[in-house]
Image (tube, rainbow, N blue to C red):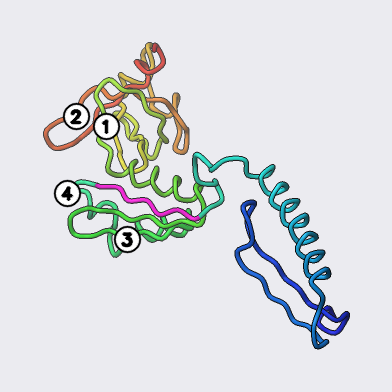
Amino acid sequence: DEDHLGDMDFKVAGTKDGITSLQMDIKITSITSDIMKEALVQAKEGRLHILGEMAKAIDKSRDSISDYAPTITTIQVHKDKIREVIGKGGAVIREITEKTGAKIEINDVGLVSIAAVDRESGQAAIDWINSIVEEPEIGKIYEGKVVKLMDFGAFVNFMGSRDGLVHISQLKNERVEKVSDVVKEGDVVKVKVLDIDGRGKVKLSMKEAETE
């Protein structure tokens, strides 16, 4: 144990410009000035060596936070979308938390606070919430999943929370007798938004998505 060996325990801390603090314990009545000078010289050499090694590792301040550092992000959603983000009985926000590991809080004006252990889980939660509140754009192509087949077409879920109808006439560029001849439930497909009516119902097209 260092506290039980030798006559002096000497600790020096500082920067490249000088000493900022020191601590000395001795087991004898006194020490000479020569010993003190030698101890300070050795401490300076050791301190400058350590500072030099540290400077090699961090030669400048980081431009961005580490991907593995905890993050807290706030985003604003429209008040009309708060219910969709929370879900019935908190089901949606609970699922986001369970799947991403992020802690999410939302207030009455739509300010969402997302606390995560790292950048990846935080961004996953942000992307999920954005997919819920984002409005589909007419003419834009999205990737979706077929969730239900009907005689007249297929319903496709896209943007995480939106369902739209691909009419049987919009499945392919050729005549289709049966919807199940082209798609089945669970298929991942590309769809183009053709129209959104006054009630929010979305008309989609697979054949137009294929031609672009």
Q: Judge from the rendering whether residue 202 lies leftward or rightward of residue 144; answer left or right.
A: left
Q: Is mark 1 on a helix, strand or loop?
A: loop
Q: How far apart are marks 4 and 3 (CA)?
A: 16 Å
Which residue position holds label 4? 80
> Which one is earlier in the sequence, the residue at label 4 or at label 3?
4
Q: Quadrant of the N terminus?
A: bottom right
In percent of the image, x 37 and y 12: which residue is there? 173
| Tag 1 near tag 2, CB within 8 Å | yes
Mark toward the viewer: 4 or 3: 3
Q: Does the magenta stretch include residue 71?
A: yes
> Which one is earlier in the sequence, the residue at label 4 or at label 2?
4
Q: Does the magenta stretch include residue 47?
A: no
Instruction: Indicate the amino acid at tag 1.
Output: Pro
Residue 50 spot, x, y in % from top left: 73, 53
| Tag 1 near tag 3, CB within 8 Å | no
Q: Is mark 4 on a helix, strand or loop?
A: helix
Mark toward the viewer: 1 or 3: 3
Which segment is the magenta one? Answer: 70-76
The image quarter containing residue 86 is bottom left
Q: In this view, does 74 lie above or below 4?
A: above
Q: Judge from the rendering whether residue 92 lies leftward or rightward of residue 65; answer left or right.
A: left
> Which one is earlier in the sequence, the residue at label 1 or at label 4?
4
Which residue position holds label 2? 196
Residue 143 spot, x, y in % from top left: 41, 30
Q: How crowded is mark 1: few (under 14 residues within 10 Å), some or many (20 or more)?
A: some
Which residue position holds label 3? 105
Q: Quadrant of the C terminus?
A: top left
